Image (cartoon, rainbow, N blue to C red):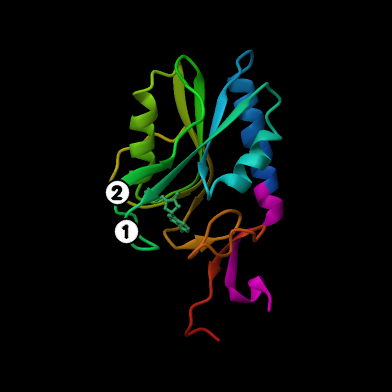
């Protein structure tokens, strides 16, 4: 049984992901020249993006992780968010780049940004691989965006459906039960 059999359509292929992530890494390296920013990976979805992105940033970066859980259904954000794993280190006075997989309603990221801002970093920017084109519930500034995608549920390259499909090397849309 192949994971790929469950995919109806590839939205972003491996080559396009690699190319865009290289561009993002170079842009971040140029913007933070002379600094040592802290990349904050949002677990678990941003892990593949983070490890590929950091290899493209030619700067002395540090890494930290935060895990959050959103109360609500599997495919819907409720906006009520809880930190389930906090950062290991203080980020006071540091330049932070939050590395997120996807922005849907923006509620998760808004909570994270407010929470991190209260820790007095020197600066705080957001780098999201995917941004869904839709009317936002939360007002949010995204500093670096990999791809704008239509408002549909995607999996792969870190993104899951019920904890599955994270290990697909591309982003795709799941086949529906009714498709054949
Ligand atoms: P938001 O709070 O609505 O912006 O939701 C953000 C979080 O919901 C992301 O970090 C993902 O974990 C999850 N999410 C949103 N859209 C998708 C999707 O299309 N596929 C997989 N996970 C998604």
Q: What residue do we see at 61% from left, 55% from top?
A: 157
Residue to which mark 2 is pinned: 79
In x, y percent, where is residue 49?
A: 61, 45
Magenta run includes residue 151: no
In x, y percent, where is residue 8?
A: 57, 73
Locate residue 154 relative to residue 48 in the image: left or right: left
Q: Is residue 44 positioned above or below 91 on the image?
A: below
Observer-nearest of 14 and 54: 54
Q: Quadrant of residue 110?
A: top left
The quarter of the picture where the C terminus appears is bottom right
The quarter of the picture where the N terminus appears is bottom right
Residue extent of the magenta highlight:
1-17
In x, y percent, where is residue 98?
A: 49, 34
Mark linked to residue 105: none
**Helix, strand, or loop for circle 2?**
loop
Would the CB of label 2 be found within 8 Å of ligand 1? yes
In x, y percent, where is residue 169?
A: 67, 57
Q: Residues within 10 Å of mark 1 (few under 14, many from 20)?
A: few
């Amino acid at each position: 049984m192949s994971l790929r059999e469950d995919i109806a359509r590839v939205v972003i292929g491996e080559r396009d992901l690699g190319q865009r992530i290289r561009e993002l890494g170079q842009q971040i390296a140029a913007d933070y020249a002379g600094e040592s920013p802290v990349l904050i990976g949002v677990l678990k979805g941003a892990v593949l993006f983070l490890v590929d992105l950091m290899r493209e940033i030619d700067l002395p970066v540090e890494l930290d992780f935060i895990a959050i859980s959103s109360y609500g259904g599997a495919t819907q954000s409720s906006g009520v968010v809880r930190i389930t794993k906090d950062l290991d280190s203080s980020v006071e006075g540091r330049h932070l780049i939050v590395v997120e997989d996807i922005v849907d309603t923006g509620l998760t990221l808004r909570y994270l940004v407010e929470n991190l801002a209260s820790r007095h970093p020197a600066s705080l920017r957001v780098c999201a691989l995917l941004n869904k084109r839709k009317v936002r519930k939360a007002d949010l500034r995204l500093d670096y965006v990999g791809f704008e995608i239509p408002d549909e549920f995607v999996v792969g390259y870190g993104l899951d459906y019920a904890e599955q499909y994270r290990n697909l090397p591309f982003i795709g849309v799941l086949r529906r039960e009714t498709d054949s």
